[in-house]
């Protein structure tokens, strides 16, 4: 009996070259779960007046996420919270759902982690262009000299690959270790390993979102020279006598 290392190899339906594998099913199931959860959690939120303890707890979590984004280097975290928060919640939810029997997290598949890394790859220049402008952002690839252009491009591609492979390796290895222990050890030890796996998943979600934040912060950082030029000359503002 063949062993499926990832849910990509678990073919649930096929018609010609069109395949429906386990990764697609679990990815959509996770997205639907997150959407329904967000709808239920936010349906009774208030913008004024007395708020419930539940809303207060949610606001604390959101404030903590914004503060973390700000500490990395993004002075206006609200502009990036929706993207970075979604990345974190998707990876974290996929990790939490491993407690469901038979569930294989989509983040244990290289196709899913590559898609998440590509989202970061596309988002970084988009945020950079929005903050600096198209021409100014393109000039960052030639810093400090024009010779660095190919190396900066290679750096963009290589870090995207590193994001995908790092998350894939850590998530897949955790699931495989738990599966092996379930077959050869008593019940208590696998339960401990499952808890440890959940903790590892939370850490990986944090690391992935923080790395994405670092890349966006680097892309949106306006050079000091441009800031100095944008400031008015205080000597010109002094009254003439």
Image (cartoon, grey):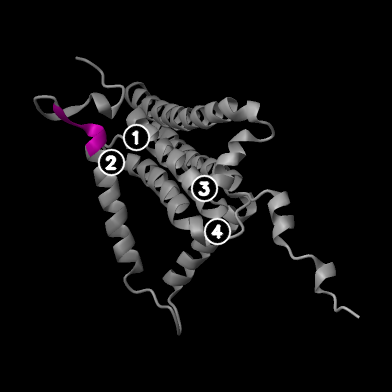
SS label for mark 2:
helix
Looking at the image, tell me whether mark 3 or mark 2 is earlier in sequence order: 2
User: What's the CA distance linking mark 4 and mark 1?
Assistant: 26 Å
Q: Which residues are magenta?
A: 18-24
Closer to the observer: label 4 or label 2? 4
Residue 77: image tag: 4
Q: Is residue 84 visible?
A: yes
SS label for mark 4:
loop
Q: Which residue is mark 3?
A: 134
Q: Which residue is mark 1?
A: 112
In the drawing, does residue 210 fall left or right of residue 27? right
Residue 27: image tag: 2
Q: Residue furthest left?
A: 15
Vertical placement of residue 30 versus 50, above or below: above
Please tell me which residue is depicted at 42% across the width and 47% down the height of the picture.
Answer: 87
User: What's the CA distance linking mark 3 and mark 2?
Assistant: 34 Å
**20 magenta-colored:** yes
Neighbour tally class for label 4: few under 14, some 14-19, many 20 plus, Cα within 10 Å = many
Between 177 and 76, the one nearer to me in the picture: 76
Closer to the observer: label 3 or label 2? 3
Indicate the position of residue 68 as horizontal and vertical percent values. 59, 54
Looking at the image, tell me whether mark 4 or mark 1 is earlier in sequence order: 4
Please tell me which residue is depicted at 60% across the width and 44% down the height of the picture.
Answer: 218
């Amino acid at each position: 009996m063949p062993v499926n290392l990832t849910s990509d190899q678990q073919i649930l339906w096929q018609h010609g070259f069109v395949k429906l594998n386990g990764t697609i099913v679990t990815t959509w199931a996770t997205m639907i779960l997150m959407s329904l959860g967000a709808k239920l959690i936010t349906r009774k939120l208030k913008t004024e007046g007395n708020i419930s303890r539940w809303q207060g707890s949610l606001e604390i979590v959101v404030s903590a996420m914004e503060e973390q984004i700000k500490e990395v280097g993004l002075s206006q975290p609200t502009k990036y919270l929706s993207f970075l928060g979604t990345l974190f919640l998707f990876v974290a939810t996929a990790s939490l759902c491993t407690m469901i029997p038979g569930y294989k997290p989509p983040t244990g598949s290289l196709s899913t982690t590559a898609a998440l890394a590509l989202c970061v790859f596309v988002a970084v220049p988009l945020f950079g262009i929005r903050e600096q402008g198209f021409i100014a952002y393109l000039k960052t690839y030639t810093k400090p000299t024009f010779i660095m252009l190919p190396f900066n491009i290679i750096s963009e591609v290589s870090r995207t690959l590193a994001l995908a492979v790092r998350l894939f390796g850590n998530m897949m290895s955790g699931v495989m270790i738990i599966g092996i222990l379930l077959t050869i050890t008593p019940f208590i030890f696998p339960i401990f390993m499952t808890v440890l796996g959940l903790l590892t998943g939370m850490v990986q979600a944090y690391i992935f979102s923080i790395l994405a934040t670092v890349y966006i912060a680097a892309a949106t950082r306006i050079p000091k020279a441009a800031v100095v030029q944008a400031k008015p000359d205080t000597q010109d503002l002094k009254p003439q006598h």
